[in-house]
Image (cartoon, grey):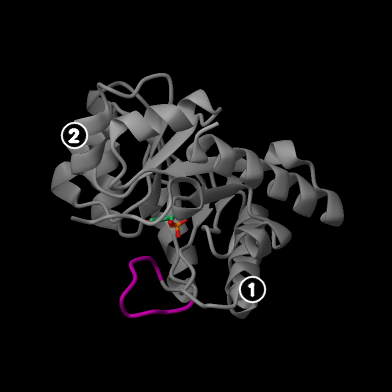
Amino acid sequence: MSYIEKNIKELRKEIDEICSEIGRNPEEIQLIAVTKTVDHERINEAIGAGAKDIGENKVQEIMEKYDVVSNVNWHMIGHLQTNKVKYIIDKVKLIHSVDRMSLAEEINKRAKQHGKIMDVLVQVNVANEETKFGLASNEVFEFFEKIQALEYIRVKGLMTIAPYEENPEAVRKYFKMLKELFEEIKTKQFPRVEMKYLSMGMTNDFKVAIEEGANIIRVGTGIFGRRNYN
Ligand SMILES: *Cc1c(COP(=O)(O)O)cnc(C)c1O
């Protein structure tokens, strides 16, 4: 068994264990294998081991790998430049990183041209980190008021990237905040908004995220090992 296969098995076991401790159904939890810097051979190994959803944070990497990696759902999880939307609009299943109206409008325009409805998540910077993208929590409602007018976009939930902390307990409060926002938005019943997905939790903090209600987790290092950026 390859280390990738072993890591995925181990992850699924951990997900099962957390879910049984807190009384959630593990099938609710979507595992996204984050493949930035990972070559297509290793991605295909992960697919062989049961990975069905792949997350990339750069348009360029999706473009390079799209034709050599098949039978998966692609997720755009990183900062998306408006002028690059056109390259991925027909390739990705879900864009996790919508954080401004100009981007939402461009996605809407390109989706319309392709005759499709694009599913997106709204990225929230719950910890208010200067170095991270995402809306501030207090901007979220106004943003939903506006984005719900776009006919070729369906908002499917929220996404956050928690600050990196050695001890994942330190970020529990941010996951709680995102979950609260999620529930609050649900009660507003905006048209074209279906609050279904809560995308939060990475290698270091996915357990806490699941405990706080995540149903999409994004794991890179925990599957492929440490990234080599060279
Ligand atoms: C890289 C990345 C991840 C995965 O991070 P790991 O710590 O390697 O699991 C998750 N989400 C986003 C947005 C990322 O860029």
Q: In the rendered structure, which segment of residues is drawn in magenta?
A: 127-135
Sequence-wise first label, 2 or 1: 2
Residue 138 appears left or right of 186: left
Read off the residue under disc 1: 172
For the point 26% across and 46% down, the residue is: 105
Residue 149 appears left or right of 66: right
Residue 147 appears left or right of 202: left
Q: Residues within 10 Å of mark 1 (few under 14, many from 20)?
A: some
User: Which of the image's four quarters has the N terminus?
Assistant: top right
Q: Residue furthest front?
A: 1
For the point 23% across and 54% down, the residue is: 102
Q: What percent of the width, then of the height, locates residue 194?
A: 57, 42
Amino acid under disc 1: Arg
Q: CA distance from mark 2 to mark 1?
A: 35 Å
Q: What percent of the width, then of the height, locates residue 195?
A: 60, 47
Of 72 and 88, the residue lying toward us: 72
